Structures are given as C-alpha cells and as structure tokens.
Amino acid sequence: MTKVVKAKTPPKDEVEFFYDVEQRTEEWHALRRGLPTASNFAKIMANGKGGGDSLGRATLMRILAGELITGKTSETYRNMAMERGITDEPLAREWYQRTNFVELRQVGFARRKLPSGRFVGCSPDALVGTNKALEIKTTRADLLIAMMDKGAAAFPAEHRAQCQGTIWVADLVELDLVIFCDNELPKLKFRIERDETYIKEVSNAVEVFDWELNKLVERIKHLGR
C-alpha cells in the first residue's frame, strides 16, 4: 500500500506527498494518470496564434482526456535525451548533496487538490528539508558549453513554469534548479524563490485547463452512449 505523508503545513490539507513511490513505475503512472503536472505547465500556459489554444496545449488535453476515460496511461517512448536523464540524474543528485552539504529526501509524487476537487501534481527530483525542492535538468555537453561560453549563464526561462509550478503544487518556499551534463563539466545552479504573482498566473491557467479537460471528458463520454 502507498504510504501518504502530508506536508507539515499544508493549506487546508490540500497537499500530499507520496514518498514510497518510485518514479516511472506503474504505481507512479497510476498516481499521475489524467492529471495536469508541473512538467506540462508551460504547455498549459501557452497561447497559439491569434490568442487561441496552442497545439501543445490542445494535444495535452486530448492525451489526459484519453487517460481519464480509459483509465490507462497514454503510450510513451524513450529517446536518447530521456535515457540520458535517467542515467545522469543520480549523479547530479549526488553532486548537489555533496557540494551543498545537505540531506536530500526523494519523493515519488506530490499532488495538490484544486477547487474543483480534482488534483494537479508534480514529481520533484528531491526535497531539501521541508520547504525546498531540487529540480535536475540534464543536457548534452555542447549545449551546456554554449551556455557557459556566454559568460554568466542566465536562468533558462523555459523552465520557469515547471519550477514555480512545483513550488506551488508542493507548497514550498524555494527550489534549486541544476543543469547537469557530466561530472567532468561545470554545473549550473539557479536558486528560484517563490513568486506569488507568477504562481497566481500558473494556478489560474491550470484551473481553467482542468475545467476544460473535465468538460471534454464529459462530451466524449456522452457521444459514446
């Protein structure tokens, strides 16, 4: 049975942590099936041409609707970048723990209850204490070198929605983002503090997406009768 450990100070008991669930296992897939998750928040917030839905947002909604209707996780695949992440993530976690003199606690999944009563989730790469998360992004050597060669590397904005979204979902104060390639190459670390204004944008976009997703599921179920 999955062990559920509540956050120490969850707002209205809305946040749950699943510590004993290993990521990428069937149990993990079952927990996140049909849910908007932080890794997809950038897609959820994206606008298409003319202000309409972006292709990524619309596709994501159909994928999650399919999961909710069938009760099955959508088909997935692993490319070289995904395989690299699986291999290098433990190395990055060990480097972070050693160089920051902290104890990390791995967590399989965290979820927050939305006003609708449904859930939104995230999968932090580790928790640092009780109020901070670690997010790891692995990359190719040439891409990391390009970032480093520009001088003081700026925070990669493409990860903003996921990082602030994880802070929101897990009710945290801050998050460290590590860009990692290899133990022989430099690492980039960014400290991201909780941004309430941006989190409000994220939560509003996710709640709208959740409402539209639920309506889509209802329409498709009705058509199938």
Image (cartoon, rainbow, N blue to C red):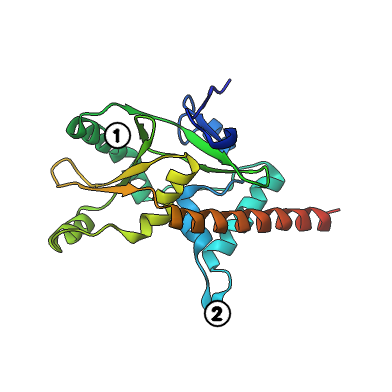
Going by the numbered disc 1, the residue's amino acid type is Pro
Could you classify mark 1 by the number of other residues whose Cα lies within 10 Å: few (under 14), some (14-19), or many (20 or more)?
few
Judging by the rendered image, the residue that carries numbered circle 2 is 50
Report, in whole angstroms, how far the alpha carbon at label 1 lies from the one at label 2: 42 Å
Could you classify mark 2 by the number of other residues whose Cα lies within 10 Å: few (under 14), some (14-19), or many (20 or more)?
few
Disc nearest the viewer among 1 and 2:
2
- Asked if residue 20 shows in the view, the reply is yes
- Asked if residue 77 shows in the view, the reply is no
The residue lying at 28 percent from left, 35 percent from top is: 93
Going by the numbered disc 2, the residue's amino acid type is Gly
Q: Position of residue 225 (x, y in %)?
A: 86, 53
- On residue 90, the disc is 1
Please identify the quadrant where the N terminus is shown.
top right
The residue lying at 47 percent from left, 27 percent from top is: 8
Q: Is residue 188 left or right of residue 53?
A: left
The answer to which quarter of the image holds residue 96 is: top left
Sequence order check, earlier mark of 1 and 2: 2
